[in-house]
Image (spheres, coloured by chain):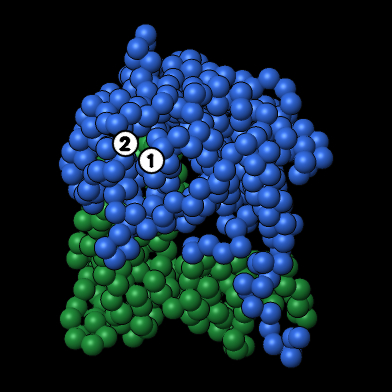
Chain colours: A green, B blue
Amino acid sequence: MYNVADLRKGLKVEIDGAPWTVTEFEFCKPGKGQALYKCKLKNLITGATMDRTYRSSDKGIEKADLEEREMYYSYKEGDLYVFSDAETYEELRVSTETLGKQKYFLIEESLCKILLFNGKPVEVTLPVFIEKKVTETEPGARGDTATNVMKPAKIDNGYEFAVPLFINQGDIIKIDTRTGDYVERVSKA
Amino acid sequence: MSKGLVKPDDLIRLESIKSNLIQRSEIIRELRNSFFSRGFIETDTPVLVRAPAPEDYINAPSAGDFFLRSSPELHMKRVAAAGYDKIFQISPCFRAGEVGKLHNVEFTMLEWYETGKTYIGLMRFLKGLLLEIVTKVKGTSKVQFKNSKIDFAGEWKVFTVKEAFLKFAGVTPEEAIAKNEFEILLTEKVEPNLPKDSPVILKDYPSSMAALSKINENDSTAERWELYLGGIEIANAYSELTDYNEQKKRFEKAHKKREENKLPAYPDDKDFFKCLEYGIEPFAGCALGVDRLVMVLANADTIRSVNFFTEF
């Protein structure tokens, strides 16, 4: 349990069963009155934001039981993605829902960070860049090296994104896993 | 000389707020001059105290066997009781846990007491004082602060707390207190909507919100006001409570409330109570946050940008 006076930017708390982090914080106090702790909070699972003002007379705030573990992605098992602990090899299953778009960027044996809330995985952070082979894209015009004109492309798992015209099927390209966007070509087919 | 080293952040900060700090020095000089020219003497009361005034929500940082004073109030009142009828003090005060745009654990307070005055007389006194300071330091009576110009020469706008709550928050102060929403409504509804083109006074606080103020017998509000400049609370004044029994009762209540709220216990200031028991002439006093006054006059955003050094 945190005291209201412990509130500060970056503190992770549990409100109504969900983990929230304080993104903005303002201390405010009318001279003789009780202090107000005005917080902007972000839900660590849904990304939703809200404003909350706490008073010195309020009871404390629950600490969010959060743990970050470094785990390797191992394999897919039905709708679940199996990760194993970097040190203990203990396995952990993450749902498609939790992974969202990230599921397209999982590469076997890549080291990921998994955020656990009350022991359950709520967020997976992948390596920022991954390399993938383009499995499907229309041929670009020969010699066209413009980077500002884009065309659709796919990778082996069906993820569709935009690449510059000069990218060909079979090229290895780099993707930013935070945005899902093309970054650069690594090697030609 | 630089010797090719990277300039430390601290130097960059001090350079960037130099004009604020020069104004700070001028304002403090003019405040002292104005008090001296009005026949006041400056007191030097202890920074280390054994018995801070027990306020519901003010905490004095502890320092060994002592506390750092949260205000010079009880000591200055003892001086006033001895017949020093015009006293002031500009000095550091300390409040544990108070850090924000308008707060720093250590801050500079101007506090003064005048025998024979009431809180209303003090309001007139402060009006003349501020007009004098502003004119001397700024060369004009109108001061740009954020998006408005505060005119120190014109009429001050005065609201009772009740009027302000009804007008801006739609409830009476008593209703707000009953729901534990007084501070939230004050900071979110009342303060942002106060006029910004003149100094503003909120007066006659609910009697529960002034541990050391006289209570008006007619409407049982506290004879207390607060000065606002640009929506920021600057000063707090009381017709001082001189009734020994009443003060004893209020401190007992405050000690109890502090205990309920698990706040550090303070011993009673026995000498202060001996003075009250012996008898003090009616008097009034005011405490003004010097850093915040400098913020307004220098049109600065935070208390940090008007202080040479702050901890956070």
Viewport quadrant of the N terminus of chain B: bottom right
Contact (CB < 8 A) between labels 1 and 2?
Answer: yes
Describe the element under mark 1 as helix, strand or loop. helix
Decide if residue B260 is on the left or right side of residue A137: left
**What residue is disc 2 on?**
B275
Residue at (62, 72) in percent of width and height: B10
The Cα–Cα distance between marks 1 and 2, rounded to whole angstroms, is: 6 Å
Looking at the image, residue B105 sits to the left or right of residue B125; the answer is left
Q: Residue at x 60, y 58 (%)?
A: B307
Q: Is residue B33 visible?
A: yes
Q: Position of residue A138 (x, y in %)?
A: 63, 71
Residue B78 marker: 1
Instruction: Tell me the crowding category of disc 2: few under 14, some 14 to 19, or many 20 or more residues within 10 angstroms, Cα based.
Output: some
Instruction: Please name the residue shown 37% across and 83% down the image.
Output: A110
* Viewer-closest of B93 and B5: B93
Residue type, label 1: Arg
User: In the visual, does A155 lie left or right of A46?
Assistant: right
- Relative image position of residue B42 (x, y in whole percent): 55, 46
Q: Position of residue A55 (x, y in %)?
A: 33, 41
Q: Residues within 10 Å of mark 1 (few under 14, many from 20)?
A: some
In this view, the residue in front, B260 or A84, is B260
Subunit of label 2: B
Inspect the image, locate mark 2, and give the three-letter code of the amino acid beneath it: Cys
Q: Quadrant of residue B141?
A: top right
